[in-house]
Image (cartoon, grey):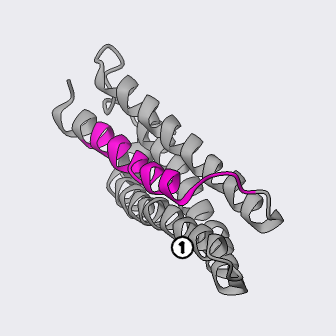
Amino acid sequence: MFDLLSTLYPWTKSVHIMAVISWMAGLFYLPRLFVYHVERGQHGGEPGESFEIMEVKLLRLIMNPAMILTWIAGLMLVLTPGIVDWGSLWPWTKAGAVLGMTWFHHWLGLRRKDLLRGTNTVSARTYRMMNEVPTALMVVIVLSVILKF
């Protein structure tokens, strides 16, 4: 199995990078949609079906598959012999940041459900601030992988 993983390494890494890019795009865009959704609702207007359709399609059709593919390809990379030095700090900081990214993804999913039910208690300002979470986690992940500290 490890020989196969080594042979597939460049393909797996390519798929992993493409999935991460897709996932990150969604993590950046969904909170912004929530800002517009909340602001439109606070000003007496109907949030409209367009926000709800965009949010659900972004989450279900792009973000969820991209997250799953990121995890599968990432775990395949981790299992490839000679790739990860578990005695170093970097795989642990990357793993922590990836878990944080996954938590944020699920937090967004819960907020989408609140918006659909009309029970949202999060302000547009908070969504704007939360929009910075994936950026901070991405910095940790990239520095961990490239600098291997």
- Residue at 68% across / 55% down in the picture? 111
Magenta region, residue range: 120-142
**Amino acid type of disc 1?**
Tyr
Residue 26 counted in the magenta span:
no
Q: Secondary structure at mark 1?
A: helix
Toward the right, the furthest residue is 117
- Residue at 16% across / 33% down in the picture? 147
- Numbered disc total: 1
Toward the top, the furthest residue is 87
Q: Quadrant of residue 12?
A: bottom left
Q: Is residue 55 above or below residue 45?
A: above
Q: Is residue 142 left or right of residue 49?
A: left
**Closer to the camera, 48 or 81?**
48
- Residue at 43% across / 62% down in the picture? 28
Q: Is residue 100 left or right of residue 49?
A: left
Where's residue 38, x and y in %?
Answer: 61, 67
Q: Is residue 114 above or below residue 85?
A: below
Q: Is residue 6 above or below residue 19?
A: above
Where's residue 139, x and y in %?
Answer: 27, 43
The quadrant of the image that shows the C terminus is top left
The residue labelled by disc 1 is 36
Toward the front, the furthest residue is 44
Q: Quadrant of residue 143?
A: top left
**Closer to the camera, 58 or 40?**
40
Counting other residues with Cα less than 10 Å from the Cα at mark 1, is it few (<14), some (14-19), or many (20 or more)?
some
What secondary structure do most residues of the magenta stretch adopt? helix
